[in-house]
Structures are given as C-alpha cells and as structure tokens.
Image (spheres, rainbow, N blue to C red):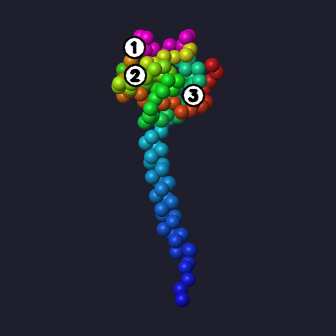
Amino acid sequence: MSSFDPRRLAKPARRITLLAALGGAVYLGSRYGLHDLPGDACSPVSTVEAGAKLLLDTQPRPLTPGDTVLLRVEGGTRLLALVERVRDEDGALWCGTDRAGCPGFDSEVHGWVPRNVVAGRVLLGFGGGER
C-alpha cells in the first residue's frame, strides 16, 4: 500500500509561490511609482516636505476632496496640488494649495483640471528637508 508523501508537493508549491510573487511584483510596479520633489523650493502642500520622495498610486480611483495629487502640466512639469472639489459629470478636479507663500497649481488661475493630467495620488511622502 502506498502512502501519501507531502514532499512530492514541495516543488510545485515553490513554483506556484514564485509565480504568484512575480505576478504581485509586476502588478505593484505597474500600479505604484516613486517621484522625487525638488529640495531647493518650498512644497505647496503642508503635508509634504520639499525634497521628499513620494509614493504614488498611478491609477487612483476615485479621487476625493482632501487628496494630494501630482499633476502633469504643460511642458512635462509636475506640480503638487490638493483636490478641493470633484465635478461629478466628468471627474474633473478643482485644485489648490494650502501654503499661501509657496507657488503651486491653483484652479482659481487655471480652471478645472481634466482627470487625465493626474500623474498619481500621493500615498506617502518621506524624507525631505525642513519646512
């Protein structure tokens, strides 16, 4: 009579685990990204330090008031902004900053921001200099 040997499952289990880990790494790499803020200027958002490294969700759904976003504007420039309002019909954003002395993106000047210019929602800002 043959008995079950669990060691026979070890090799296929390792392969499945490796494939799952690789798939997870590919997903995380495509969904999340890092962005460095310049350290030689102020940050227009009080929760993020100048010179910080940002962890971004590059496929955020949905954005809500209070979210900090990184916007891609003309010429490839990227600017931090706070979402103040979201327009229901097309998801456009009304953005601003919370540091009056630091220039940043302002919908009072530029108007509604199309959803497709959002490079990502800031999940975490770490490092950086003094405020």
Report the amino acid beneath label 3.
Ala
Residue picked out by circle 1: 110
In this rendering, the answer to whether 111 lies above or below 60 is above
Quarter location, residue 110? top left
Q: Are marks 1 and 3 in contact (CB under 8 Å)?
A: no
Which residue does the image show at 56% across and 32% down from the upper left? 124
Q: Residue at x 59, y 24 (%)?
A: 47
x then y, percent, for residue 46? 59, 20
Which of the marked residues, 1 or 3, is nearer the chain's N terminus? 3
Label 2 SS: loop
Residue tagged by mark 2? 87
Segment colored magenta = 100-110
Left or right for 28, reference 130: left
Task: From the top left corner, tell me how far across and down residue 130 is, in percent.
Answer: 64, 21
Residue 54's spot in the image, x, y percent?
Answer: 53, 31
- Secondary structure beneath dot 3 equals strand
Q: CA distance from mark 1 to mark 2?
A: 15 Å
Q: Which-is-in-front pick, marks 1 and 3?
A: 1
Report the residue at 56% width, 78% height from top.
5
Mark 3 or mark 2: whose residue is earlier in sequence: 3
Taking the view exactly as shown, the residue that stands out farthest to the bottom is: 1
